[in-house]
Image (spheres, coloured by chain):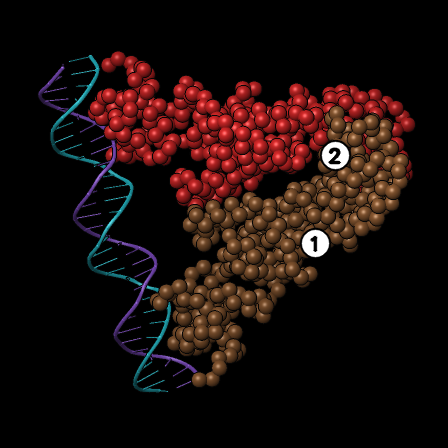
Chain colours: A red, B brown, C purple, D cyan
DNA sequence: GTTAGCACTCATTTCTGTTGAGTGCTAACT
DNA sequence: AGTTAGCACTCAACAGAAATGAGTGCTAAC
């Protein structure tokens, strides 16, 4: 017996099976495929091919007398070789663009609408991570006393993103002192990227005149806030969308999916991307979160200015419409970058 | 036939039925009640009483041969007359307290954990609205240029809450000007409540030296941000929790519930409270949101300092455990006020 | 006023056969 | 050698039918 290989016809059949399964969620039988336009062989022949594809690991059979279902390996092959980029219709592109633009120019709010647009357009669940602030620059720092021994440190960056954190005030520093320190920090740190900030701090700490406790705490806050984007900056849209699909008609599954979505930690793991590929696709177990091993995650990237950016993504059933999702993400990534560009 | 009245025994039976239905979600039959401790009459007698209660509108019968189910009117009566406040166990109170305290002192983050604690403790869905800022005081205002013609206006209030909004810069104002204006605004507005702010602005606008366009826009932003708490300040916890209850085993219902939760507008309507009652209970249709007419909403209030505060609430099935929910909300309201107190 | 007894209702469960989509294999055909 | 028709076989899904049982309402006795 000769070694099985994926010839031209097997490609075609595999693609037909996946396409059909993506829209119907039902195991695909040989007749269905042979009836398809462009296929001119009998069901029996298809069956033989299917049998080969199964042996090769591209198809699974739920039980003897059901049709075939694509395996994870099949989807992997599909997105690697069979994806054809679909252009969005102009009218749809227009509508998405509009939805993003009409809102206030606050970054937070743009991202929130983007999540809605994304989940509406795909009918899956969308995830958007606010821009990572690492390579952004500080515009302004202000220490504002809010209580006896507590001040609020407010950091404004060039992308118009504001971060704040409580910081404790050492003995003997009054409001005027804080004000002076704010001015000094703003002056020294303005327009510097994070790496330079650290160095500047090192220099400042050598200066005996300045309160070290306060400075240390301040640096700490800046690093924490700007480097490892903290937990407030993830927006999820359309979490209920997936319930429309038959794979979630089991309430138990629906519940565990939604519960997983509630953990910021899980989401963060999901959208952490390996490569710097334009579009990142993780199919089923590939996403690394066991609770979501029957979901696929597709992520893309958007830019804020040319220094930094964030991630946008879609999470849906493994049999998701990858073609469409990729097109939408690609378009949205660009649109988002565009809309946020004038914020920098 | 004498007019039907709710006598002592009917009270008891009604309460028993509601208690049972709350835990089992199954129509309650006469045998079940007569077997209960403290009841010493036969099922037949209970049936007669039930029949009366049904005529009075407190019970419904899904179909002839099923047990009885409490009506909305019954729940109303229950919460108005039959509620007995349950004290939380010390160990539980302790645990909740701990969960709130161990987190960072950022208001946002405290509220986020509070939502989680609340939904965990009740196993329903929790909603927390960040403090309304109306009666808070401004601590600091800073205009930070972020782009050619755009500045970010950052407002820090005494509760340590930071609000920001983009604002356009009129021609001919450079960074130094903005800085001066920030100083001036901070000086004039610091520690003033919103009502006084409006007046101060009126005075400032009379002063010809100051740029009116900018001031007008600034006032606008302040009012919008501080008065009608904007859409970013609602946190929802445990939205998946309700799926565990049989009333949501129908995926359609689950979906429409979750979809309703996604609309900030809907939520805002839900937590807008009529009276200034300590605890506000709206049963089923009483909550005013048709999509959620089979949910009950219980809300309470927490304080930030003694000037202002926010709302915390629970949304769950009509047959929710009101006793427990009320206790938890009451405790959490106090705890939250306590935790946030040192922020002012 | 209370309760036992009984006929009746009706959702739920269980069992049964039936249907039909689909497979795998074999033998004939090109 | 690859393709296809034919056929026996598998198995989930559907549809009744019968059994179950929780529950009611009514009546008559206590």
Instruction: Give the image location of residue A342, x and y in percent.
Output: 68, 26
Residue that mark 1 sits on: B302
Q: In this image, A149 relative to A268: left or right? A: right
Which residue does the image show at 45% across and 42% down from the upper left?
A243
Q: How far apart are marks 1 and 2 (CA)?
A: 32 Å
Which residue does the image show at 61% across and 63% down from the upper left?
B86
Q: Can residue A102 be seen in this view?
A: yes
Q: Is residue A270 visible?
A: no
Q: In this image, B101 relative to A9: left or right? A: right
> A314 or A149: which is nearer to us?
A314
Q: Residues within 10 Å of mark 1 (few under 14, many from 20)?
A: many
Q: Residues within 10 Å of mark 2 (few under 14, many from 20)?
A: many
Label annotation for residue B167:
2
Chain containing mark 2 = B
Instruction: Give the image location of residue A160, x and y in percent.
Output: 71, 30
Instruction: Give the image location of residue A254, x and y in percent.
Output: 46, 42
Which residue does the image show at 75% across and 45% down from the upper left?
B223
Q: What element carries label 1?
A: strand
Which residue does the image show at 68% across and 55% down from the upper left?
B301
Q: Is mark 2 on a helix, strand or loop?
A: strand
Mark 1 vs mark 2: give the one in front.
2
Q: In this view, does B260 lie above or below D19?
A: above
Q: In this image, B146 relative to B67: left or right? A: right
Chain containing mark 1 = B
Whichever of labels 1 and 2 marks the residue nearer the N terminus, that label is: 2
Quadrant containing the N terminus of chain B is bottom left
């Amino acid at each position: 017996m000769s070694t099985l290989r994926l010839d031209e016809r097997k490609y075609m059949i595999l693609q037909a099976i996946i396409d059909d399964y993506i829209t119907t969620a039902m195991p695909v039988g040989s007749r269905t495929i042979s009836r398809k336009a462009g296929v001119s062989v009998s069901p029996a022949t298809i069956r033989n091919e299917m049998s080969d594809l199964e042996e090769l690991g591209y198809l699974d059979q739920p039980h003897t007398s059901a049709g075939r279902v694509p395996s994870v390996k099949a989807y992997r092959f599909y997105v690697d070789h069979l994806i054809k980029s679909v252009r969005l219709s102009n009218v749809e592109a227009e509508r998405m663009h509009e939805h993003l633009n009409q809102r206030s120019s606050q970054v937070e709010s743009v991202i929130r609408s983007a999540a809605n647009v994304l989940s509406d357009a795909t009918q899956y669940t969308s995830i958007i991570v606010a821009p990572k602030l690492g390579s952004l620059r500080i515009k302004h720092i202000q220490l504002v006393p809010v209580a006896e021994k507590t001040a609020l440190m407010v950091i404004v960056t060039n992308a118009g993103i504001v971060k704040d954190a409580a910081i404790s005030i050492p003995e003997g520093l009054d409001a005027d002192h804080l004000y002076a320190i704010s001015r000094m920090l703003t002056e020294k740190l303005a327009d510097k990227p994070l790496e330079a900030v650290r160095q500047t701090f090192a220099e400042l700490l050598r200066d005996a005149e300045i309160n070290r406790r306060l400075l240390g705490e301040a640096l700490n806050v800046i690093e924490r806030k700007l480097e490892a984007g903290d937990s407030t900056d993830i927006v999820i849209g359309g979490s209920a969308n997936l319930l429309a699909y038959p794979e979630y008609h089991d309430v138990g599954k629906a519940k565990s999916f939604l519960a997983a979505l509630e953990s910021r930690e899980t989401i963060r793991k999901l959208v952490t991307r390996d490569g710097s590929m334009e579009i990142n696709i993780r199919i089923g177990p590939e996403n690394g979160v066991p609770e979501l091993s029957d979901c696929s995650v597709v992520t893309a990237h958007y830019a804020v200015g040319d220094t930094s950016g964030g991630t946008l993504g879609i999470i849906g059933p493994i049999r998701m419409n990858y073609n469409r999702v990729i097109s939408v993400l690609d378009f949205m990534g660009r649109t988002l970058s565009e809309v946020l560009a004038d914020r920098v």
